[in-house]
Image: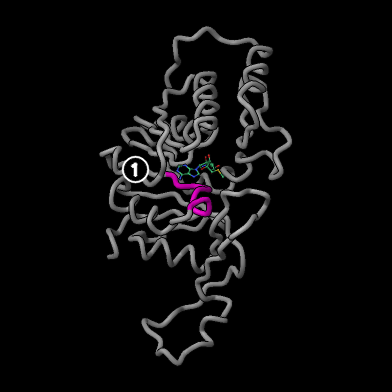
Amino acid sequence: MSLNAVAPMTTGEIQRRVSELGEWFHNLNLGGVQTAPNHFLGDYPSCKWRRFQPSIPTDLRGKTVLDIGCNGGFYSMEMKRRGADRVVSIDSDPDYLEQARFAAQVNGCEIEFQQLDVYEVATLREKFDLVLFMGVLYHLRHPLLALDLLNEHVVRDQLVFQSLQRGASIVEPLRENYPFAETAIFNREGYPVMHFVERRYANDPTNWWIPNRACVEAMLRSSGFEIVDHPEEDVYICRRRGMHG
Ligand SMILES: C[S@@+](CC[C@H](N)C(=O)[O-])C[C@H]1O[C@@H](n2cnc3c(N)ncnc32)[C@H](O)[C@@H]1O
């Protein structure tokens, strides 16, 4: 972490800027000012991070990190705190990026922000040691395409993945193939299922696809990732295996 050459702001100035930057999804502590103290998930994402952080290397010195859908920058800043050489953080939403830029400035974190859609990651022309792809998949109309693009263009080694999940959380072993006459398998709880949201879920028009756990795991494998750890109900630590490998 390196300190930016910016005069420290007073609590009042931080509070005013936090309000100007609109509604925050990440509850950050910026010089004593909470950005989303009434978050519906509690102290989010700190409460989630505490549960899976032991599965991320504590020393990221010499490593590069890409945070996709960085939002207010919580995870980007945590990666910087762990010593990552470079953190590149992208989001398709300029308002969230503005929040993240401000948070990084207040916390003295040097992070490279870029407005970029996950479908455009190839334009970064770089592979990263660690890629965070958290809370984005279910906001996409083409989720498998995004995972394929990550595998092909930006993940060198590790992927940290998180998705909203609904439906059964059991995973059953599947056979390599089923005959056309087999229909019962599709009704089994452990079969991979992706729920399509044509209208709304949680009042968010960008929620499109919500997988069950078996589906998340199958999609990650199908896109060339090996799941090496599952520290949290909906968080998966993966290694790149190569495309459709
Ligand atoms: C639920 S938030 C997750 C934020 C953060 N990654 C986390 O896990 O707390 C989803 C974020 O993904 C961003 N996002 C949604 N669709 C995207 C896309 N197609 N490309 C890049 N970012 C996207 C949103 O703007 C938002 O900041």
Viewer-proximal residue among 147 and 46 = 147
Give the answer, above or below, for where 214 lies relative to 156.
below
What residue do we see at 64% from left, 28% from top?
22
**Vertical position of residue 206 compared to residue 179: above or below:** above
Q: Quadrant of the N terminus?
A: top left
Nearer the observer, 205 or 57: 205
The boundaries of the magenta stretch are: 132-140
Q: Percent from the top left, x then y, of residue 228? A: 41, 59
Vertical order, 51 against 176 (above or below): above
205 or 172: nearer the eye?
205
Q: Is residue 31 left or right of residue 120?
A: right
The C terminus lies in quadrant: bottom left
Q: Is residue 53 above or below residue 86?
A: below
In the displayed image of the protein, which residue is found farthest to the right? 38
Q: Secondary structure at mark 1?
A: helix
Q: Residue at x 54, y 30 (%)?
A: 95
Find out whether residue 134 is within the magenta segment: yes
Q: Residue at x 40, y 86 (%)?
A: 178
Nearer the observer, 126 or 64: 126
Left or right of 148 in this view: 80: right
Q: How is the image coloured?
A: one colour
Q: Which residue is mark 1?
A: 121
